[in-house]
Each structure stands twice: as structure tokens, then as C-alpha cells.
């Protein structure tokens, strides 16, 4: 079982923006990521530090969608 994601300072979350779109980020506490809906990227948070490098981010397009049946495009 994985340990819960470390807490991130709420003030930091207020000022951080996506380095690709310069848009707002959403904090996904369960996965320990900052989500950029505009860029379709999830930036990891490691040891309480957001890693704001596009090369380190996970593409949201790679994530399976719960609303699609297997084989659907």
C-alpha cells in the first residue's frame, strides 16, 4: 500500500501555474499531482515539491477513462 502524498503549502498552490499554458492547476491529493487541464498534463509532487517540468509530467491522454468501454476511441 502506498503512503499518502505529502502536503503541499496552499500558498504555493495559489501562485503556481502550468509552465506550458500558464493556466491554473488543480491539486490531486490522492495521486500526488498537479493537474493542468489545458495542457492535459499531470505534474508529480515529490517529497512535497511540485516538479514543474513538462518532460517529467504524465500525459492525461495516457490515463484510461472510466467513461469509455474497452475498445472505444
Image: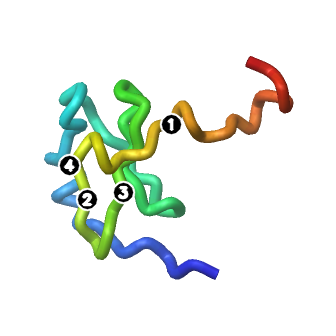
- Mark nearer the N terminus (4 vs 3): 4
Spatial CA span between label 3 and label 1: 12 Å
Spatial CA span between label 1 and label 4: 22 Å
Q: Secondary structure at mark 2?
A: strand
Tell me whether circle 2 and circle 3 mark residues in contact (CB < 8 Å): yes
Q: Position of residue 71 (x, y in %)?
A: 83, 25
Q: Residues within 10 Å of mark 4 (few under 14, many from 20)?
A: few
Name the residue rendered at 28%, 35% in the picture: 24
- The residue under label 3 is 44
Left or right of 46? Residue 9 is left
Spatial CA span between label 2 and label 4: 13 Å
Name the residue rendered at 19%, 36% in the picture: 19
Q: Nearer the viewer, mark 2 or mark 4?
A: 2
Spatial CA span between label 4 and label 3: 17 Å
Q: Quadrant of the C terminus?
A: top right
Q: Position of residue 7 (x, y in %)?
A: 34, 72
Q: Residues within 10 Å of mark 1 (few under 14, many from 20)?
A: some
Quick check: 3 above or below 11? below
Q: Residues within 10 Å of mark 2 (few under 14, many from 20)?
A: some
Spatial CA span between label 2 and label 3: 6 Å
- The residue under label 1 is 60
Amino acid at each position: 500500500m502506498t503512503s499518502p502524498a505529502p502536503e503541499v503549502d496552499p500558498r504555493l498552490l495559489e501562485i503556481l501555474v502550468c509552465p506550458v499554458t500558464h493556466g491554473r492547476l488543480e491539486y490531486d491529493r490522492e495521486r500526488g499531482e498537479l493537474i493542468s487541464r489545458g495542457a492535459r498534463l499531470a505534474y508529480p509532487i515529490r517529497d512535497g515539491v511540485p516538479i514543474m517540468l513538462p518532460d517529467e509530467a504524465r500525459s492525461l491522454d495516457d490515463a484510461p477513462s472510466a467513461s469509455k468501454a474497452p475498445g472505444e476511441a
